Amino acid sequence: MKSEPFEYSWDDLVAEKEGVWSGVRNHKAKNNLAEMEVGEQAFFYHSREGLEIVGICEISESGILDPTDETGKWAAVKVVPKTKLPHAVSLKQIKAEPKLADCELVRYSRLSVAEIKPDEWSMICALAGI
């Protein structure tokens, strides 16, 4: 899950204790949000500034409508912070790993909510030192 840190950072989520992941206006990202279930985890990625995965959050409420959407067609979820990564994982590191070349984070660089497959998750966690 990508967020520009000057708009909503990892530290903002930690301070709030629970945040609504809203404002997504891309159909692929919307579908990824809609498929999320309570208890699933997601990487928190700082986009534009940093270009790195900085933490892991957990879905605390799924299947909700985006409160910023007046049309009622866009999805949202609530998330809680779980773990700040011991070592942030940069996009450069991810792109340098051939086994992550097909990762949605790499293939769809503008996608704000990307699917991370289990083997990709494990590799990124290893890069982060967990």
Image (cartoon, rainbow, N blue to C red):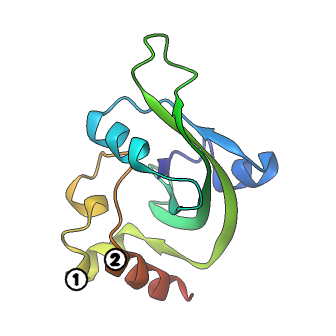
- Count of numbered badges drawn on the protein: 2
Q: Nearer the viewer, residue 78 or 24?
A: 78
Amino acid type at image mark 1: Lys
- Separation of marks 1 and 2 at Cα, in angstroms: 8 Å
Residue visible at 43% across and 11% down in the picture: 71
Residue 99 is marked as: 1
The residue labelled by disc 2 is 120
**Secondary structure beneath disc 1?**
helix
Amino acid type at image mark 2: Glu
In the rendered image, the vertical position of residue 85 relative to residue 108, given as above or below: below
Q: Is residue 82 left or right of residue 128?
A: right
Instruction: Mark 1 and mark 2 in contact? Answer it, CB < 8 Å.
Output: yes
**Secondary structure beneath disc 2?**
helix
**What x and y, as percent, mark residue 116?**
35, 65
* Between marks 1 and 2 in the image, the one whose residue lies nearer the viewer: 2
**What x and y, as percent, mark residue 129?**
55, 89
Occupied quadrant, residue 88: bottom right
Q: Nearer the viewer, residue 104 or 70?
A: 70
Q: Is residue 115 left or right of residue 39?
A: left
